[in-house]
Image: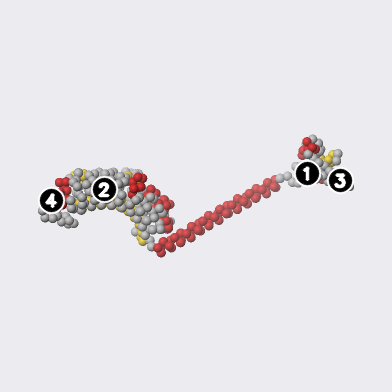
Amino acid sequence: MVKLTTKYLFRKLSKKNQLQARRKDESDMEYLTRVTHLHLQSQFIDKIAAIPQCPAISVVYLQNNLLQTIQNLDNFPRLTHLHLEHNYISKMENLKSLTSLKKLYLGSNEISVVEGLEGLKDLVELHLENQRLPQGETLYFDPRTLSHLAKSLKVLNISNNNITSIQCLDGLVWLRKLLVEHNLIKDINDVTETLSCLTNLEEFYSQGNPVASDRKYLDAIVVATKSLRVLDGKAVNEKTRTFITNMWNQRENRRRLSAFSTMALDSEESFSQSQGDVLNRRADAPPLGSKLFPVWKQLTLSNGVPSLPSKVFGSGSFGSGAMQKSLKVTKIPDRRSFNYYI
């Protein structure tokens, strides 16, 4: 195991640097203030000690080491590219001071939460693929970090991290390239709804997910993303987009027409059933001439007043009791029969 110290750094810099040759009689400190790239990959480094000010360094290669924490990088004010992939880092920390950072490579570590990037206002690329996560655990995004990344991030790689949904990424409106390969994404609607919000997205990679086997996968994504140019490594040109969009619209119109027809048939069947119920109720009603609805000829006269059968309204004439008070009878003497107007 190796600790990255100033002495170790000077020793590494004393070796021939093909990108920046060391000037004759140039001291270590003078050279350190001028060098722009640090090649420290695959050196069994497990810890970073305090390093003197390195004002010109823009790229640091620390991949393939034994680092467990990110620390002591404050003296790289112009750092734009940081390679930390293939280490044992479990937490994203001590990065807020790297305000000039544009590309951060953290693939193949042990990170479970994407956080601590609030100060990186110029970050355009974030690589977090292949995290070594505990069984059943997935990569989680801190909403505060996502909110800050939305202002600048253009490339995001989160492949192979047990992710089941990308809905939380719908605010990354400047994203141009998104890689979510070999995850656990199943819902095509989750994908299309998210991608429809990423109005600048040009490349999308989702191979190795269950959703990629959905028969609607290609068509649904092409229709949902107006700016997409590459899907899973295959070009999507305007001719292809127009053809797929037209076919999709035709299928949608047929589907809607079929749904409308089914609804109309259901309504007609319900109406017919209602008519049948009415007819059945009419058939069950007592016929005219029954005891409940007697014909006029069945009325009998009692003192010149018609009287219904007693089984209908009880005993007594039609003109007796309270009923008589509301009944007005007019007799026409010139006729053999009588007409009564109530």
User: Which is more N-terminal, label 2 or label 3?
Assistant: 2
Residue at image mark 3: 332
Foreground label between 3 and 2: 2
Q: How many labels does the image show?
A: 4
Crowding near the residue tagged with mark 4, few <14, some 14–19, many ≥20 C-alpha atoms within 10 Å: few
At a point 78% along the width and 44% down the height, the residue shown is: 294
At a point 12% along the width and 51% down the height, the residue shown is: 27
Foreground label between 1 and 3: 3
Marks 1 and 4, how far apart at CA:
128 Å
At a point 82% along the width and 42% down the height, the residue shown is: 329
User: Which is more N-terminal, label 3 or label 1?
Assistant: 1
Q: Where is residue 180 shown, x and y percent of the image? A: 35, 52
Residue at image mark 2: 98
Q: Disc 4 on helix, strand or loop?
A: loop
Crowding near the residue tagged with mark 2, few <14, some 14–19, many ≥20 C-alpha atoms within 10 Å: many
Residue at image mark 1: 294
Q: What residue type is labelled 1?
A: Pro
Q: What residue type is labelled 3?
A: Ile
At a point 60% along the width and 50% down the height, the residue shown is: 270
Residue at image mark 4: 27
Crowding near the residue tagged with mark 1, few <14, some 14–19, many ≥20 C-alpha atoms within 10 Å: some
